[in-house]
Image: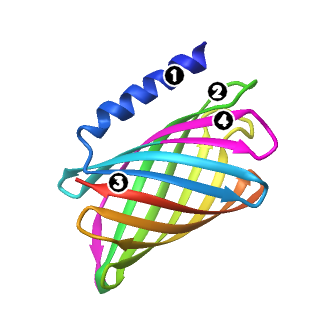
Amino acid sequence: MKKFIVSLVALVAFVSGAAFADTVSVGAHFGNSDQRYYEVGVAHDVGANVVVTAQGETEQSAHNDLLSQQYSAKVGYKVAVPFGITVVPSVEYGVKLVPGANDQSFYGAGVSASRQIYGPVSGEVTYRYRSSFVAGPAVAENRVSAAVTWAIDAHDSVSLDAHTYTGNPSLLHVFGVSYSYKF
């Protein structure tokens, strides 16, 4: 029942948060261990280079009916550096809901660097660290990512991305596609 209530609160937060969002995104990712990840996110540029995002993710193994869910909120600060690169350091807080196990709150920190490559095509590299507040292997990850995004028009964009995770899971390569809509 606790997981249902947390999931319901998170869903209401995402739906109401979308009303204030500058960008809404959905994505599907597939891992090398037959795992599937689906995510939805919202982002809002607060002003003064501050960006706030919220994300929900569900994960399922190909031969398992159990779903784990993860919800997080992140705050970042955009910094323009030479050569047209934008760097965004960020901090995050979230919760991971795992069937048959204790829910785990986690904190995270990361940095991304993005740049327009050519015309409507841009690239981004990201590093993210996450860890549980309590001891145990529930959330302990390092993730390195690369993405290429094609801006179809002023509102729509499609991204292809690749992530490599170390920690828990021990080593996982994930590839995916996502769609974003800017208001």
Circle 1 Cα neighbour tier, 10 Å, few/some/many (<14 / 14–19 / ≥20): some
Residue carrying label 2: 103
**Measured Cα–Cα span from mark 4 to mark 2:** 10 Å
Q: Amino acid at mark 4?
A: Ser
Residue carrying label 3: 76
| Range shown magenta | 56-82
Q: Amino acid at mark 1?
A: Val
**Comes first in the chain, label 1 or label 4:** 1
Contact? badges 4 and 2 (CB < 8 Å): no
Residue carrying label 1: 6
- Along the viewing direction, whichever of 174 and 180 lies nearer the viewer: 180
**Comes first in the chain, label 4 or label 2:** 4
* Left or right of 78 in this view: 168: right
Element on which disc 1 rests: helix
**Comes first in the chain, label 3 or label 2:** 3
Element on which disc 4 rests: strand
Residue shown at 51%/22% (left/top)? 6
**Measured Cα–Cα span from mark 4 to mark 3:** 26 Å
Which callout, 1 or 3, points to the residue nearer the camera?
A: 1
